[in-house]
Image (cartoon, coloured by chain):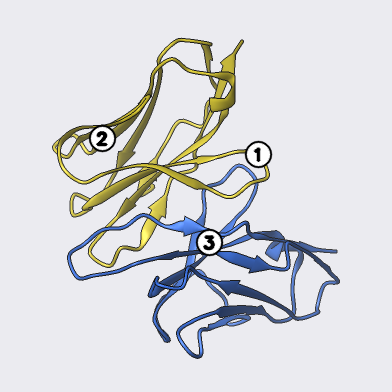
Chain colours: A blue, B yellow
Amino acid sequence: DTGVSQDPRHKITKRGQNVTFRCDPISEHNRLYWYRQTLGQGPEFLTYFQNEAQLEKSRLLSDRFSAERPKGSFSTLEIQRTEQGDSAMYLCASSPWRFKAHYGYTFGSGTRLTVV
Amino acid sequence: QKEVEQNSGPLSVPEGAIASLNCTYSDRGSQSFFWYRQYSGKSPELIMSIYSNGDQEDGRFTAQLNKASQYVSLLIRDSQPSDSATYLCAKGGATNKLIFGTGTLLAVQP
């Protein structure tokens, strides 16, 4: 297993354009998480999936953001009508999950988005 | 009040010394705690996890948890220049969603 893969590693886009990021989790992990990180801050929770079900979405997340995990394997995060404030590192992570158990996450390398 | 609070640093220690990193949290229902190391420009890497009061040791790293005081710490013994990084504290609840602090920058001086 090669770990969590994210694509692309870097994305530069013009304000107002749509962008889509992909995440391939560790194959046996049924939980997948998206976070956003800006300089000097810790990762900020965006959303997470258990298999194909999106279980929670951050209240801070605008309607321009949408995520999917159609077959419970890879996930995509789309940002529509990008704004300069969307510039950040977008991190994907995965973990196993069982009721009442606790697991740390394995993060991917991230996608660095720059909106110009 | 932030859910997870850390001093942003930088914390500067000489090579070979013990580095002590601290974290407080606001939710008494938090069940799990994690320390991640993040090198500049890289993604976070899990180094320690702790779930019950007391100490958890792994090599040069010791995590300490005090639920009554809502306090988590990470001790790094025999600090090396390669330990220079940002250390993120995170807490988890029943859903295993992690909430991260802003991180503490550690600088180990040769």
* Observer-nearest of A33 and B62: B62
* Tag nearer the camera, 3 or 2: 3
* Observer-nearest of A63 and B11: B11
Q: Position of residue B106 (x, y in %)?
A: 53, 25
Residue type, mark 1 in image: Ser
Residue B1 appears anywhere in the view:
no
In this rendering, do the residues under marks 1 and 2 share a single chain?
yes
Spatial CA distance of label 3 from label 2 is: 31 Å
Q: Residue furthest bottom?
A: A70
Label 3 SS: loop
Spatial CA distance of label 1 from label 3 is: 20 Å
**Relative horizontal placement of residue B43, taking residue A17 as reference (left or right):** left
Label 1 SS: loop
Q: Residue at x 35, y 28 (%)?
A: B59
Spatial CA distance of label 1 from label 2 is: 26 Å
**Relative horizontal placement of residue A116, taking residue A109 as reference (left or right):** right
Q: Which mark is residue A3?
A: 3
Q: Which residue is mark 2?
A: B71
Label 2 SS: strand
Placement of A18 over or under A33, stated as above or below: below
**Relative horizontal placement of residue A96, taking residue A7 as reference (left or right):** left
